[in-house]
Each structure stands twice: as structure tokens, then as C-alpha cells.
Image (cartoon, helix red, strand yellow):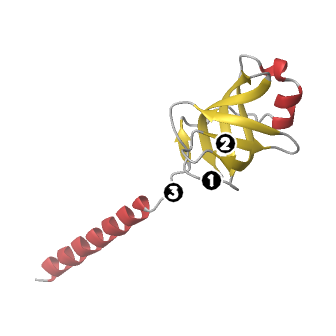
Amino acid sequence: MRSKEVKITMFTAFVIFTGLLAILVGCAKNNIYGEKVTVQSTTLIDDLIAKPQNFSGQTVKVEGQIIDECPGGHWFHLKGNKEIIYVTLSGFTLPQKVGKTVIVEGNLVDNNGTPALLGRGVEIK
């Protein structure tokens, strides 16, 4: 009889633990949009704007604060230390994150004579 009570107690504990784990996983924030950011070193937005020719053809990682964003989440302006860069997203959208600090990985492109970033991945900090 004692063995049966132990089995029931262990089963109950297992069910409760599994339920709590499912709740925690379900409540986890999705902080990565698009592709995972893999570039190790961070490039300053100010450097991208000052010398875009130095980053031609390279995949870069930048960090900054979103200061405004397309209502549909297709693009945003990212502020570095002093400079602001236009970021357009490739193949995904971003929910409204104005005011958030983000890390963006992508390629520098020319946007009518102004450097811009074609973002492939965004990580919310």
C-alpha cells in the first residue's frame, strides 16, 4: 500500500512540474526576430555613417535605440552615440519597439546616397 502512495505522489509532482515548465516556456519573451545575430564584434553606427566605404560588402552588427518605427514593422531608425541610421528589414517584421535598445545584424546599403542597413536579424536587449 505504501508503494502505491509513493507512486501517486511522484506522478502528481511530475504532472505539476511539467505544467509549470510549460507555463514558463509559454511566457518566455521572443527577443530574436529574423535570423539569429552571429557577428561577434559590434560596429559603431557613427563609423558606418562616417566611412561607409570601409564596410562595403561586409555583414555588420550594430547596437542602438529605436527612435521611430514603421507602423507595420518593416523599417526603423536606429540611434547610435550621435548618428542615426535607417534600417529596413529583410524577410520579417518587428513589433513596435520604439525606445528599446536592439542589436541588428545586416549589410550596409546605399539609400539614395545615404548609408542604410538591410537588417537580417534583430535582437531586443
The foreground one among 49 and 73 is 73
Which residue, given by chain and number where applicable, does mark 2 sit on? 76
Residue type highlighted by circle 3: Lys
Q: Is there any visible trace of residue 66 in the rendered image?
A: yes
> Which residue is pictured at 71% across the width and 16% down the height?
57
Provide residue 72's location: percent of width, then percent of height. Answer: 54, 45
SS state under label 3: loop
Which residue, given by chain and number where applicable, does mark 3 sit on? 29
In the rendered structure, the answer to whether residue 13 lies left or right of residue 40 reads left
SS state under label 1: loop
> Which residue is pictured at 79% across the width and 26% down the height?
114
Residue type highlighted by circle 1: Lys
Residue type highlighted by circle 2: Phe
Give the distance between the C-alpha atoms of the residues marked 3 and 1, in whole angstroms: 13 Å
Quadrant in the rendering for residue 7: bottom left
Which residue, given by chain and number where applicable, does mark 1 sit on? 97
Question: Which mark's residue is nearer the viewer, 2 or 3?
Answer: 2
The foreground one among 57 and 16 is 57
The foreground one among 67 and 101 is 67
Q: Is there any visible trace of residue 44 in the rendered image?
A: no
Q: Residues within 10 Å of mark 2 (few under 14, many from 20)?
A: many
Quadrant in the rendering for residue 6: bottom left
Q: Residue furthest left?
A: 1
Q: Are marks 2 and 1 in contact (CB under 8 Å)?
A: yes
51 to 37, vertically: above or below: above
> Which residue is pictured at 29% across the width and 74% down the height?
13
> Which residue is pictured at 40% across the width and 60% down the height?
26
In the rendered structure, the answer to whether residue 70 lies left or right of residue 23 reads right
Give the distance between the C-alpha atoms of the residues marked 2 and 1, in whole angstroms: 9 Å
